[in-house]
Every structure is written in structure tokens, then in C-alpha cells.
Amino acid sequence: MADPTTTSTPAAPKTVDAGKWADRRVGIRLVIYTAGIHAFAGFIMLLFELGGRNR
């Protein structure tokens, strides 16, 4: 059996991030998700409001 300290595995290539562009994509995604969650919450509140009127 080979000694694990002497066996070397080839290093994986380092990934290069897009930097500023990646940050911009994350920010845009955050705005879209936040707006979507607020729209969904507003729709649920509307359903509760309309459901409460039928009592």
C-alpha cells in the first residue's frame, strides 16, 4: 500500500471568479428575490383580507 504522505494528487485548476460582475449578479438576484417574496406575501395578505370579508 502506498504511503499517503508521498502520494501527490494533481492540483485542480483554480477557479477565477468574475469579480465585480459576480457581485452585480448577486445584487440583481437579491433584488428580484426580495421583490418576489414581498409580492407573494402581499398576495397571501390579500387572500386573508378577502376571506375575512365573507364572514
Image (cartoon, rainbow, N blue to C red):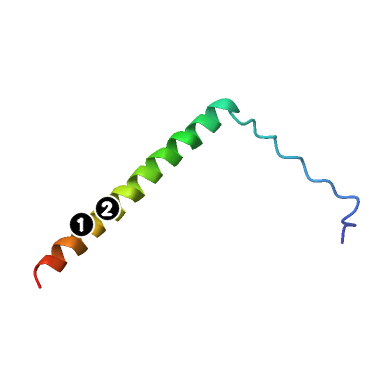
Q: Residues within 10 Å of mark 2 (few under 14, many from 20)?
A: few
**47 over 54 or under it: above or below:** above
Label 2 residue SS: helix
* Residue 19 location (% of width, % of height): 60, 28
Between 12 and 54, which is closer to the camera in this rendering?
54
Q: Residue at x 23, y 54 (%)?
A: 43
Residue marked by disc 1:
46
Q: Residue at x 84, y 46 (%)?
A: 8
Residue marked by disc 2:
42
* Residue 23 location (% of width, % of height): 55, 32
- Which quadrant of the view contains residue 9? top right
Instruction: For marks 1 and 2, give the CA distance.
Output: 6 Å
User: Quick check: 13 left or right of 45?
Assistant: right
Mark 2 residue type: Gly
Confirm or deny contact between disc 1 and disc 2 (CB under 8 A): yes
Count of labels shown?
2
* Residue 33 location (% of width, % of height): 39, 45
**53 over 42 or under it: above or below:** below
Q: Residues within 10 Å of mark 1 (few under 14, many from 20)?
A: few
Mark 1 residue type: Leu
- Which quadrant of the view contains residue 54? bottom left
User: Quick check: 32 left or right of 21?
Assistant: left
Between 1 and 15, which is closer to the camera in this rendering?
15
